Image (tube, helix red, strand yellow):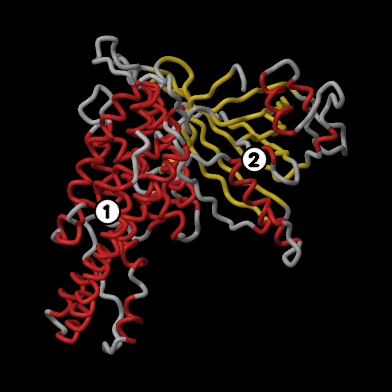
Amino acid sequence: MSGMQEIELKFQIPEGALEAVRAEFTRLNAGQNTDLRLRASYFDTPDRRLAAARMALRVRQEGEDWVQTLKAGGSNTMMRLEDNQPAQEPAHGQPIRADLGRHAGTPAQEALERVLSWSMAQDPQGHGTGLIELYGTDITRTRALVTVGKGTLFEGEVELALDLGQIHSGSLSVPVRELEIESVSGHPMAVILAGRDWVARHGLWLDTQTKAHRGDRLAREAAALLAPTAAAPDQAEPAVHTTLAHPAKVKSGSTMDEAWRAGVETCLEHITGNLSELGNAPTSTPALAYQLRLGLRRLRALGRLWAHTPWALPASSLDKATTLTRQLGYWRDQEALAWLPEKLLAAGSPARPLPSPTPPPGLPADVVALARSALATELCLDVFATLLAPERPADAPHADLLPWLNARLTRWAARCARHAHGLAKLPDTELHQLRKRGKRLRLAAAIYAPLWSDKAFRRHDRALQSVLTGLGRVQDEVVAQAWYAQLAQQEPQAQFACEWLQGRRKSLRKKAQRSAQRWLKRRSPW
């Protein structure tokens, strides 16, 4: 959109760490006051066209200066595009207004015309677009410049910005307590290095949500308060926003490096979007936790797909993703099996709550705590770091993307097919392995779905999903039986549940087998 691209990361500061962070800024600035008051008004149409396009338009007072800025998402959540233009202070007593003509002759003009159906020739200032102020911010920013990675390949100067204040809309407000780290000069990896340092020392957690995202959510809540019984459809949306899985932005002519980067970027966006939403949520929601777990599984599938190539993801990063997946799985299994006690009671079992499984090591208190954990932030920083690495050397083994990918997925599918033929007779452990391989195949293929016929891909994907759903029901009840078997060692009456679950296994396996037979007849798109 613009000739200017920011490379930055933002972190939330736990309330208990704020004083230590403030003290560090005082030390970095040698005790001198570098505070700058930033007051901004954010504009959008009533139906949120800019927000839907991942854009934000603001007019901000920065000390004595006024600046109008249009921001938009970049190739990943570490990179953002922006266009800054000087603005005038409004006349005394007049409201702040956005003037779209300030972006004349820039790529921002083209973006605004496209998203707002605006014509500069017919409406030079954009007053006919219906832009209104939806929310505002009042921030005190403290800056400090530091050099990171001195004497290394990744040396660079970064600006640290401590933002304290609030976002407000109507009668509502939420506090702002953030640290932004932006690349000024040198290697952009310096941003990652600085982020790791502050996370390790102060317990900060990564948040890829912009102030505009938080402000838009607050504006919806404020509007709903004003008209709780007749809220517009867009105002009645849930307070949380899930980031869904999207395929990589690839085409048939993409290179191996382009496809790898596009795959990593779509996985990273999926993970960071839901991590940030969970981290800012007062309580966890199953939809967010599900999408976060799915994002982690997609990243792990991508890691397996590119293993043993010059684009292999670091094993340490994949280990972190595995740990987080297992921790989320602890809560997921209990939610998925919440129906079981009532069914057992109806079948004649004594009333008994679902047994509590043994939690995995290092389990956070809840899903929100997991989203704010150092492990989750470290994983995201690791993946960002892989994207900042240079393109693979020219002497890396060359392969055309599509033949390589087709061959890889064909091998995976063939291995699944060999076991699927005899699915009904497989031991539970091997059935579980088949399900894991099938999920890996489905997730990896979905990332690169644009490379194949859409119709053929969807048919194959639906057939494979049906198999995995059937296998998932079997595995859920295998897990539940193990819980009740452990409980039966202390409470013999729990043996009833074990026998009841075992009695259902054959029927569930047959259903999965029928789905597998249909999938085996389906031709793959690759």
Quadrant of the frame with the C terminus? top left
The disc, 2 or 1, on the residue closer to the chain's N-terminal end is 2
Secondary element under disc 2, as helix, strand or loop, is helix
Say if residue 64 shows up in the picture.
Answer: no
Say if residue 464 shows up in the picture.
Answer: yes
| Amino acid type at image mark 2 | Ala
| Residue 221, image quadrant | bottom right
Q: Total number of numbered labels?
A: 2
Residue 104 location, x and y as percent? 75, 18
Residue 149 location, x and y as percent? 33, 20
Camera-side residue of 144 and 291: 291
Residue 348 location, x and y as percent? 28, 89
| Residue 87, image quadrant | top right
Q: What residue did someone put label 2 on?
A: 51
Quadrant of the frame with the N terminus? top right
Q: What residue did someone put label 1 on?
A: 326
| Residue 5, image quadrant | top right
The answer to whether residue 242 is above or below residue 473 is above
Q: Residue at x 37, y 60 (%)?
A: 366
Q: Residue at x 36, y 72 (%)?
A: 338
Instruction: Describe residue 377's horizontal placement relative to residue 15 as left or right.
Output: left
The answer to whether residue 259 is above or below residue 351 is above
Secondary element under disc 1, as helix, strand or loop, is helix
The answer to whether residue 427 is above or below residue 28 is below
Camera-side residue of 229 and 415: 415
Instruction: Describe residue 61's horizontal placement relative to residue 26 as left or right.
Output: right
Instruction: Describe residue 311's horizontal placement relative to residue 265 as left or right.
Output: left
Residue 453 location, x and y as percent? 45, 34
Instruction: Describe residue 434's horizontal placement relative to residue 285 as left or right.
Output: left
Camera-side residue of 239 and 144: 239
| Amino acid type at image mark 1 | Arg
